[in-house]
Image (tube, helix red, strand yellow):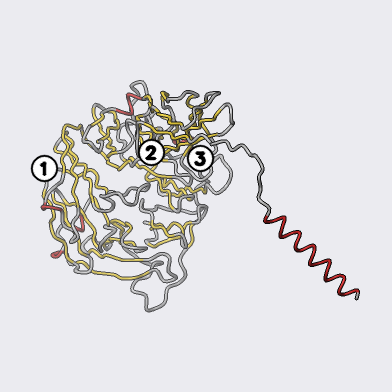
């Protein structure tokens, strides 16, 4: 009886719920249509603006229901990185008209529009490329009248002369300045360094105003100033080679960043860096004629190689002519014996316990002038090394153990510098590893040649792609890519 009563009550309750659910809702509600806002601008895609120029963007606002309270506007610029620290408020107007003073690079621009009445905000974003006058191109060191200066060949073939002296109130680089190098540090900041016989100059990469010199780089500057090369490898490891000694630092520690004391011992290192993330820096010592690893404070040998090694990295016993990055993690090293009459091409992979990969004796008849070559470049696409002797540019095919002439300069030409096109910011650069720039002198007249490299290693059309003339004596050339 009790169970029957409970069942009857449950049935009545369920019926009431169903009836209530089916009851037609006759409530009187007011629905308000939302304002649909569309923001259009008079620019599309990435917008490029020259440093110090005015960036202008005009907007058109379309509304389905015009706002009764009007809008607040804000234009905000950020660095185009994962977590930008700095924001620049450019304007609080419907349209943008602002002078751009930020460092060249790629930025994100956000346009915020807030309805004063409803409090609803709207957003439109833009990509902005800030371009410096000296943003990218080939930098050259010119020497004339006992002083040196920097000039640049821009991608549109415009040539900017005397850019260092113009930025520094007619102060010039020291006579004999022999090396300009462009590097990119751990934070992606571009740096330009100029090395002279007894000085080191850092011009700011945007306007080339001098911002540093030799002593500024060290916790304790060495007594002898003889800078030879500056390397940044693995993004956070930096080394200056000075008077044959390495001075290193890492930027994986809090700032300020300064170079350490020189490595203990007696050294005379060749100015060529061999590097992998596993081995760190590797240098060749002229005095002991062997390779050493460098851990940013000290030099130490490789492990003893097996008897089957094709060469002994700890006992090479030859004079190094050149070392440069080849394909993958391989490095091409060119040596001559101590009698200066035989040449060898060694291939090594410093990331391996036994780095020795191959050794090739290059018969003198097969590679004319190689033993006395002055300038070298290692291909990163093929097992080739380019070298210069006199006015002839050769391609050394290492597996074939043979060289061939790929270009002959006018009689009397002296090649001052030869560099491979390597863009550390944009690996998809159309000329990446496929173009060689040569700075050459015919007497006191400097010329710059650009050669593009075919799949065979030869130059397109067997000649240069472009030629720039009208320079004073040239000492060096380097690619400056867009920051």
Horizontal and vertical percent position of residue 43: 35, 33
| In front of the other: 231 or 219 | 231
Horizontal and vertical percent position of residue 322: 29, 56
- What is the secondary structure assignment of the residue under circle 2? strand
Q: Could you tell me how far apart the alpha carbons at marks 2 and 1 are, in whole angstroms?
A: 32 Å
Q: Could you tell me how far apart the alpha carbons at marks 3 and 1 are, in whole angstroms?
A: 42 Å
Q: Residue at x 25, y 28 (%)?
A: 161
Q: Which mark is residue 412?
A: 1
Q: Which residue is mark 3?
A: 218
Between marks 2 and 3 in the image, the one whose residue lies nearer the viewer: 2
Quarter location, residue 273 = bottom left
Q: Residue at x 26, y 36 (%)?
A: 154
Q: Residues within 10 Å of mark 1 (few under 14, many from 20)?
A: few
Q: Name the residue furthest left.
A: 411
Seen in the picture, residue 325 relative to 316 is either above or below; the reply is above
- Looking at the image, residue 315 sits to the left or right of residue 110; the answer is left
Q: Which residue is mark 2?
A: 192
| In front of the other: 51 or 107 | 107
- What is the secondary structure assignment of the residue under circle 3? loop
Q: Residue at x 33, y 48 (%)?
A: 423
Evaluate whether residue 82 shows in this view: yes
- Looking at the image, residue 483 sits to the left or right of residue 88; the answer is left
- Looking at the image, residue 353 sits to the left or right of residue 380; the answer is right
| In front of the other: 171 or 428 | 428
| Mark positioned earlier in the residue sequence (3 or 1) | 3
């Amino acid at each position: 009886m009790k169970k029957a009563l409970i069942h009857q009550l449950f049935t009545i309750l369920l019926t009431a719920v169903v009836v209530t659910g089916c009851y037609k809702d006759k409530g009187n509600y007011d629905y308000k249509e939302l304002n649909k806002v569309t923001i259009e601008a008079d620019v599309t895609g990435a917008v490029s603006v020259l440093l110090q120029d005015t960036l202008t963007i005009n907007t058109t606002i379309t509304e389905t229901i015009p706002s009764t309270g009007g809008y607040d506007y804000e234009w905000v610029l950020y660095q185009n990185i994962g977590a930008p620290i700095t924001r620049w408020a450019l304007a609080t107007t419907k349209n943008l008209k602002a002078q751009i003073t930020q460092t060249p690079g790629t930025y994100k621009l956000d346009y915020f529009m807030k309805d004063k009445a409803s409090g609803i905000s709207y957003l439109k974003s833009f990509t902005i490329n800030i371009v410096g006058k000296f943003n990218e191109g080939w930098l050259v060191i010119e020497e004339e009248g006992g002083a040196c200066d920097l000039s640049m060949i821009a991608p549109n073939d415009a040539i900017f002369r005397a850019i260092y002296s113009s930025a520094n109130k007619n102060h010039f680089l020291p006579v004999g300045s022999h090396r300009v190098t462009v590097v990119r540090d751990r934070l992606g900041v571009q740096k330009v360094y100029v090395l002279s016989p007894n000085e080191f100059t850092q011009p700011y990469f945007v306007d080339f105003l001098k911002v540093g010199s030799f002593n500024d780089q060290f916790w304790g500057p060495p007594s002898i100033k003889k800078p030879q090369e500056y390397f940044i490898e693995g993004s956070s490891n930096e080394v200056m080679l000075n008077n044959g000694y390495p001075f290193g630092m890492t930027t994986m520690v809090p700032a300020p960043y300064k170079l350490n004391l020189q490595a203990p011992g007696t050294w005379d290192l060749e100015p060529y860096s061999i590097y992998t993330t596993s081995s760190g820096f590797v240098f060749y010592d002229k005095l002991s004629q062997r390779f050493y690893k460098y851990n940013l404070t000290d030099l130490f040998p490789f492990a003893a190689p097996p008897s089957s090694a094709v060469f002994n990295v700890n006992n090479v016993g030859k004079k190094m002519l050149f070392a440069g990055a080849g394909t993958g993690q391989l490095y091409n090293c060119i040596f001559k014996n101590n009698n200066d009459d035989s040449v060898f091409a060694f291939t090594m992979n410093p990331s391996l316990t036994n780095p020795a990969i191959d050794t090739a004796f290059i018969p003198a008849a097969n590679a004319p002038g190689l033993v006395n070559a002055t300038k070298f470049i290692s291909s990163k696409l093929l097992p080739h090394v380019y070298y210069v002797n006199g006015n002839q540019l050769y391609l050394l095919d290492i597996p074939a153990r043979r060289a061939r002439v790929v270009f002959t300069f006018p009689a009397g030409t002296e090649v001052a510098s030869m560099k491979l096109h390597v863009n550390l910011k944009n690996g998809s650069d159309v000329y990446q590893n496929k173009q060689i720039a040569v700075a050459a002198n015919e007497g006191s007249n400097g010329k710059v040649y650009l050669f593009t490299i075919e799949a065979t290693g030869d130059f397109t059309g067997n000649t240069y792609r472009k030629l720039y003339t009208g320079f004073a004596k040239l000492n060096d050339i380097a690619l400056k890519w867009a920051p």
